[in-house]
Image (cartoon, rainbow, N blue to C red):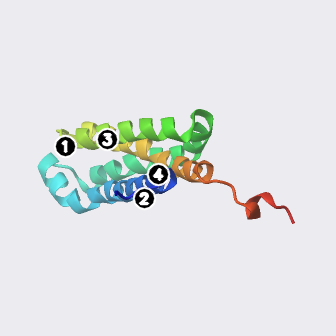
């Protein structure tokens, strides 16, 4: 007799894992910044540019990503965001200079930006409505 999980619990667990991974992805460059700076020969200004390469598309796609998630659905949007963010994370390991690192971080911000509003939509639509929500006082 195995343990049976409800689909909503599995989705919630996957979304929690996604939140954790995106958080680690977002902050791990700060930990590795010193080594990246030395290896690529970046100045402090160039390193700051790399940090902002993630932040600006992340900000932009927090807003527009919510619309994309509404338009195409959470499942498709989270899949494609995950593919973009995975490719960007992998490509970060192969960078050889400022331009490549900038593009990889920009793509990571693009891929991760839409995940939070879309995951919120997935949680909203994936839960059954309760009587308290349907009742209008």
Which of the 4 image quarters holds residue 107?
top left
Q: Are marks 2 and 4 in contact (CB under 8 Å)?
A: no
Q: State the residue at coordinates (50%, 39%).
A: 75
Mark in front: 2 vs 4: 4
- Of the residues under marks 3 and 2, which one precedes in the sequence? 2
> With respect to residue 31, does 97 lie above or below?
above
Where does label 4 land, which residue? 11
> With respect to residue 80, does 30 lie above or below?
below
Tell me where residue 131 appears, x and y as whole percent. 75, 61
User: How far apart, in angstroms, are the residues tagged by discs 1 and 2?
Assistant: 25 Å
User: How far apart, in angstroms, are the residues tagged by discs 3 and 4?
Assistant: 19 Å
User: How far apart, in angstroms, are the residues tagged by discs 2 and 4?
Assistant: 9 Å
Query: Regarding mark 1 in the picture, which secondary structure is present there?
Result: loop
Where does label 3 land, which residue? 86
* Image quadrant occupied by the N terminus: bottom left
Where does label 1 land, which residue? 93
Other residues around mark 1 within 10 Å, as few (<14) / some (14–19) / many (≥20): few
Q: Are marks 4 and 1 in contact (CB under 8 Å)?
A: no
Mark in front: 4 vs 1: 4
User: How far apart, in angstroms, are the residues tagged by discs 4 and 1?
Assistant: 30 Å
- Of the residues under marks 4 and 1, which one precedes in the sequence? 4
In the rendered view, does 67 fall on the left or right side of 116? right
Where does label 2 land, which residue? 16
Query: Regarding mark 4 in the picture, which secondary structure is present there?
Result: helix
- Of the residues under marks 1 and 2, which one precedes in the sequence? 2
């Amino acid at each position: 007799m195995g343990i049976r999980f409800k689909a909503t619990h599995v989705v919630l667990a996957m979304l929690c894992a996604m939140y954790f991974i995106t958080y680690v992805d977002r902050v791990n460059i700060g930990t590795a910044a010193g080594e990246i700076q030395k290896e690529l020969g970046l100045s402090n200004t160039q390193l700051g540019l790399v940090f902002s390469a993630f932040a600006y598309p992340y900000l932009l796609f927090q807003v527009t990503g919510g619309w994309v998630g509404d338009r195409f659905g959470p499942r498709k949007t989270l899949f494609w965001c995950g593919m973009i963010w995975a490719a960007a994370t992998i490509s970060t390991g192969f960078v050889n200079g400022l331009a490549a690192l900038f593009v990889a971080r920009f793509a990571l911000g693009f891929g991760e930006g839409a995940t939070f509003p879309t995951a919120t939509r997935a949680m909203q639509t994936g839960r059954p409505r309760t009587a308290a929500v349907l009742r209008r006082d």
